[in-house]
């Protein structure tokens, strides 16, 4: 199975500051024939189902604010919030879909400092 | 609008069975793969299973393989998860989630979830 490891496990950032979450996969998620990285990012607020933020590592889902960005390739990926807002408090997960045994990272809890 | 509504959760004793349902609306159900994903207390998301748009393709996480069975009835726009030989570690909120396409592997719509508690 592909193991997904996020860092840090938790993060406290001041309002208006940048938040960065990292995700590392145990094998490359880059599919050479189509040059796509098989990685998605989700946001889960307390008591809510997950919400898709990005797929193909950097394609923003409709309605996601542009202060959110996804980047990376191969085995190393990053979710960045350029200017943290109060409503961004949540747990963030990366997920690989390169292998049919889909796996999530352990999650990163983002809080306000 | 896309809606996914899970049902069938509850309290069940270890070793017993439970069947979850997920009623879908607002999209052409038979065109999309559907996943089950769970969130255990104090843990992170765990992918459980996927079924392809026509039911011909099914994959399971190692933790549930041989105990859980995913199925669908496209005539009723409904997804199922038959859970047998339940264990304490199966306690979780179970979400059904629509695949972005026939079978990409990621999900663009999720239900609100149904809680399964395995306890004696």
Image (spheres, coloured by chain):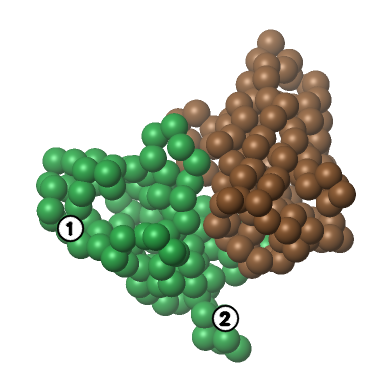
Q: Chain of mark 1?
A: A
> Which label sits in the foreground, 2 or 1?
1
Which chain identifier belongs to the green chain?
A
Residue that badge 1 annotates: A83
Q: Chain of mark 2?
A: A
Query: Image quarter for residue B56?
Result: bottom right
Residue that badge 2 annotates: A31
- Would you say B65 lies left or right of A73 here? right
Counting from the top left corner in percent of width and height, residue A99 is at: 64, 66
| Above or below: residue B40 compared with residue A31 | above
Secondary structure category for the residue under label 1: loop
Whole-number angstrom distance, CA of label 2 to CA of label 1? 32 Å
Q: Nearer the viewer, residue A3 or A18?
A: A18
| Above or below: residue A106 compared with residue A26 | above
Residue for point 43% across, 64% down: A62
Residue for point 54% across, 63% down: A96
Name the residue furthest top: B120
Task: Identify the mark nearer the N-term, 2 or 1.
Answer: 2
- Would you say B25 lies left or right of A85 here? right
Which chain identifier belongs to the brown chain?
B
Counting from the top left corner in percent of width and height, residue B103 is at: 69, 65
Secondary structure category for the residue under label 2: strand
Counting from the top left corner in percent of width and height, residue A101 is at: 66, 58
């Amino acid at each position: 199975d592909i193991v997904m490891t996020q860092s840090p496990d938790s993060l406290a950032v001041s309002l208006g500051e940048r938040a960065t979450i990292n995700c590392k996969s145990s094998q490359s998620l880059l599919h050479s024939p189509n040059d796509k990285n098989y990685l998605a990012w989700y946001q889960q607020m307390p008591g809510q189902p997950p919400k898709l933020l990005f797929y193909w590592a950097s394609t923003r889902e409709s309605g996601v604010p542009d202060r959110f960005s996804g980047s990376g390739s191969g085995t190393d990926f990053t979710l960045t919030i350029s200017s943290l807002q109060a409503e961004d408090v949540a747990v963030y997960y990366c997920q690989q879909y390169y292998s049919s045994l889909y796996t999530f990272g352990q999650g990163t809890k983002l809080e306000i400092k | 609008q896309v809606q996914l509504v899970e049902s069938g959760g509850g309290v069940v004793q270890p070793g017993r069975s439970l069947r979850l349902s997920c009623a879908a609306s607002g999209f052409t159900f038979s065109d999309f793969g559907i996943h089950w994903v769970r969130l255990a207390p104090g843990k992170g998301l765990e992918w459980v299973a996927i079924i392809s748009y026509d039911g011909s393709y099914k994959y399971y996480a190692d933790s549930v393989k041989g105990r859980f069975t995913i199925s669908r009835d496209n005539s009723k726009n409904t997804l199922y998860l038959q859970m047998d030989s339940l264990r304490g570690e199966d306690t979780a909120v179970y979400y059904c989630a629509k695949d972005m396409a026939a079978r990409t592997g990621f999900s663009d719509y999720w239900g609100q979830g149904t809680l399964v508690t395995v306890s004696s």
